[in-house]
């Protein structure tokens, strides 16, 4: 297995090099040179595996044996030792047509923990075994930052800087990032929105000289290893639901803003997991819904919503999907991304849109619909959805695909009490979250200019 760029000017690099490169040096995104296809017989063998065993099996197709098996096993064991459920990502049945895949049992109560706990272990391994200085740089709409910080806080040879949009994340999300006092952590609270933070991050990674001089590494979903780690729970959930649902078709409904989590589902499907439809759930920032329905990818006006982790207009991982829908044509991808940068819009041909719609459905969930879904399932099932998970459930209902649907529950409702209270529901915080409100915060508020952020970064990385 080797890794190449969606834009064609990086190729034939190995697994660890792809992990460290993050964003491809030509500005594209790294993808496997060939997606392995898992046979039906092999899928049958995987049905009884534990989550950790399944991860090791899937990764074996991608790592080129660059990591000794015992070392990889140790990283996987450590990654999930802190999860509050032995299954890591348990599945709950809500009714005969709808299941919930609970992805919030990690240390920061969000689905990002599943990949980022592993990536934190992996970065520490590479830093120690390969004598690498690692400076992790990422942007977050709320959950990635806390999960990434938790994965590497206090680790030798690693520093992490996370940008988040100032006062545009939930209070719990902010506290999870800014109450961490470890000296290897820097939080920059940026005036602007997530797209502003993400654009600056991508520009800094695209400056190859700056990237190499400052040892920058990516923890956002621009890093392919994060996508790969997230494919595991699609396989795991499929196997669990298949045991209950029999031969019915299985769909996945995925709350997404950056197209990362649903791209992991697309990768699983390309690997041979017999998924029917991938249902893309967005909120009022519905650029991705419009692409699925009309073939037009064009950012609209940014809106703050009850589901802030999806308040994204420009989806980083969209380029990966574009690469595959264009037939792995790097030249065509480069042309369209240049067009997008110049004109702010991509339009695909009708025949390509038909292919998109054969694999995806989509629904943009308005604010009241989100709150009504929370109230509905709390009343009927005594199950409290967070607003992002509610978007996934609402989209599953709206799209009405045949068979059964597994909807991804991406965060614990305690992380978004602002929305829960609007539903007239009082919840009790889990103790780790309740304790956050008693801790002092540490963050640096900056203007959304590349110059200010670069200055803060260089000072942080050069600190002893």
Image (cartoon, rainbow, N blue to C red):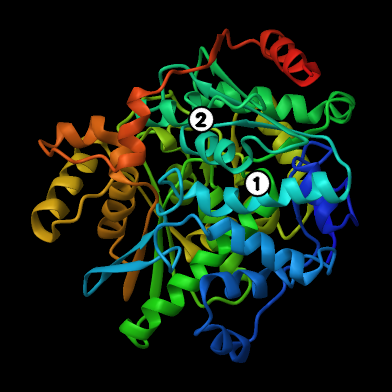
Q: Is residue 7 visible?
A: no
Camera-nearest residue between 117 and 157? 157
Q: Quadrant of residue 55?
A: bottom right
The CA distance from mark 2 to mark 1 is: 32 Å
Which callout, 2 or 1, points to the residue nearer the camera? 1
Pointer 2 residue? 299
Q: Nearer the viewer, residue 228 or 104?
A: 104
Report the residue marked by disc 1. Answer: 120
Which image quarter holds the C terminus?
top right
Q: Nearer the viewer, residue 79 or 144?
A: 79
Residue 455, horizontal then vertical, whole percent: 73, 10
215, above or below 50, in the image: above
In terms of sequence position, does the residue under pointer 2 or pointer 1 come before the other?
Answer: 1
Is 21 placed left or right of 391 in the picture? right
Residue lying at 10% horizontally and 36% vertically, measured from the top left? 424
Where residue 266 appears, as percent x and y from the top left, is 56, 62
Farthest bottom residue in view: 41
Q: Is residue 396 left or right of residue 333?
A: left
Judge whether 31 appears above or below 443 on screen: below
The image shows residue 273 at horizontal and vertical percentages of 55, 76
Residue 15 image-quadrant placement: bottom right
């Amino acid at each position: 297995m080797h890794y190449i760029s969606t834009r064609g000017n990086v190729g034939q690099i190995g697994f660890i090099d792809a992990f460290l490169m993050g964003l491809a040096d030509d500005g594209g995104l790294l993808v496997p040179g060939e997606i392995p296809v898992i046979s039906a017989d092999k899928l049958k063998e995987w049905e009884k595996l534990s989550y950790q065993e399944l991860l090791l099996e899937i990764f074996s197709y991608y790592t080129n044996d660059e990591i000794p098996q015992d070392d990889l096993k140790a990283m996987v064991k450590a990654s999930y030792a802190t999860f509050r459920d032995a299954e890591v990502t348990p599945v709950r049945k809500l009714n005969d047509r709808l299941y919930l895949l609970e992805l919030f049992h990690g240390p920061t109560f969000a689905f990002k923990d599943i990949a980022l706990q592993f990536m934190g272990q992996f970065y520490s391994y590479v830093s120690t075994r390969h004598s690498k200085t690692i400076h992790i740089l990422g942007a977050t709409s709320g959950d990635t930052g806390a999960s990434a910080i938790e994965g590497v806080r206090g680790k030798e040879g690693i520093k992490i800087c996370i940008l988040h949009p100032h006062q545009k994340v939930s209070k719990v999300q902010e506290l999870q990032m800014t109450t961490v006092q470890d000296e290897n952590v820097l939080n920059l609270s940026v005036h602007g929105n997530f797209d502003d933070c993400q654009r600056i991050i991508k520009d800094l990674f695209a400056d190859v000289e700056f990237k190499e001089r400052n040892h920058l590494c990516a923890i956002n979903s621009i890093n392919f290893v994060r996508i790969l780690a997230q494919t595991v729970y699609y396989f795991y959930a499929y196997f669990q639901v298949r045991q209950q649902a029999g031969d019915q078709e299985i769909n996945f409904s995925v709350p997404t803003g950056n197209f990362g989590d649903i791209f992991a589902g697309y990768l699983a499907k390309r690997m041979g997991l017999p998924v029917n439809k991938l249902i893309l759930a967005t909120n009022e920032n519905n650029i991705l819904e419009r692409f699925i329905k009309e073939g037009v990818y064009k950012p609209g006006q940014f809106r703050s919503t009850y589901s802030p982790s999806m308040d994204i207009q420009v989806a980083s991982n969209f380029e990966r999907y574009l690469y595959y829908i264009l037939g792995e044509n790097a030249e065509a991808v480069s042309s369209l991304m240049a067009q997008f940068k110049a004109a702010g819009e991509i339009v695909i041909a009708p025949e390509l849109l038909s292919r998109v719609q054969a694999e995806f459905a989509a629904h943009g969930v308005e604010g009241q619909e989100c709150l009504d879904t929370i109230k509905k399932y709390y009343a009927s099932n005594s199950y409290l959805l967070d607003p992002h998970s509610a978007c996934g459930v609402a989209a599953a209902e709206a799209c009405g695909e045949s068979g059964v649907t597994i909807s991804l529950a991406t965060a614990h409702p305690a992380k978004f009490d602002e929305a829960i209270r609007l539903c007239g529901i009082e919840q009790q915080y889990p103790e780790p979250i309740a304790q956050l409100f008693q801790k002092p915060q540490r963050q640096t508020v900056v203007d959304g200019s590349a110059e200010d952020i670069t200055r803060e970064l260089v000072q942080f990385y050069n600190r002893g």
